[in-house]
Image (cartoon, rainbow, N blue to C red):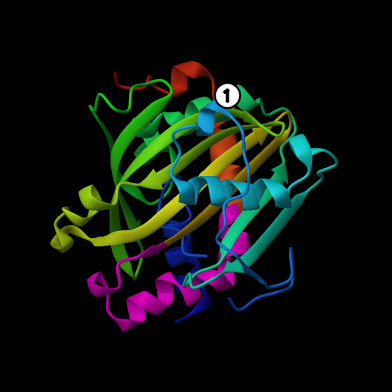
Amino acid sequence: MANGTRTAALTGLGVIGAIVALGSFWSAGRSPEVVPLAPLPLKSSGLDEAPEEVRAFLGRVLESLPEGGAGVTGYRFQHWKVADKPTHEAVGLKAVPGVGPEAVIARVMDVDHYPENVPHVKACEARRDPAYVRPAKVRFTQVVGVPGVAKVQQELVLVDAGTLRGYRVAYWYLLKPETNALDPKAGARSEFSVGAWLAAPGVVGYALSSWPRREDVNALQWASLTSGADVLARKVIEGNIDSLAGWAAKPDRQQGSPKP
């Protein structure tokens, strides 16, 4: 696959709450290692109801970052292998002067306006569900177009977790039964997807771990969405951060308002 095509395909994976499959590059961040799946202790009311895989993932992510983004200049990227996951977990953190954490998280929670603000999100719609009530939580359906590779669809829950170790955090996780019930003819369904946006004054971060259902994709698509995505994850995550920061910087009148 040509480099340009691969880049475009991976960009489609690296959007808010999308299937971004993050092992074959070790030039930046932590050295490759197998991290046990045991959850790290995180105490926060924003995580009280989080699934175990979210708590474990956020524990590893926050352990890898300076508290509250202290000393971050430019862009830093880290990734690591976790047990038998087919993709690496990864996190990018970038200094974005003037960005406000509350503005960032507000845009992250505004899932209905992803299509007009986030590249390659073909559809994204909040679903009414009494278990996930705005503004703190939202359940939504999303379809992402990965140019030259596939469409990927999923049902997710996005949660504003408040402040954790100096970062405003919003995390997402997959509703697997609901995702499995989606029509595979409309796109490959996610098998696993957890991730988070992190924001501190002048700093924005993006972390994720995900991959599609193997039976929904062919061999080439699987390679593109797993090991192929590993190769360019550093660049893709930085692009996600830049897009979100740009959206957060727009005046409110350009944002639209979240649907009730």
Query: Does the segment drawn in magenta span residue 234?
Result: yes
- Give residue 84's position: percent from left, percent from top: 49, 73
**Front-most of residues 249 and 101:** 101
Q: Residue 30, located in which quarter of the rendered image?
A: bottom right
Which residue is depicted at the point 46% across and 73% down? 86
Residue underneath mark 1: 103
Number of on-image labels:
1
| 256 lies above or below 53 | above
> What range is drawn magenta here?
211-237
- Give residue 129's position: percent from left, percent from top: 24, 28
Q: Residue 118, located in which quarter of the rendered image?
A: top left
**Front-most of residues 66 and 83:** 83
Which residue is depicted at the point 57% across and 24% down? 103
Amino acid on which disc 1 is placed? Ala
**Front-most of residues 228 and 208:** 208
Q: Secondary structure at mark 1?
A: helix
- Give residue 16's position: percent from left, percent from top: 45, 45
- Residue at the limit of the structure toward the right, as seen here: 71
- Give residue 257's position: percent from left, percent from top: 38, 19
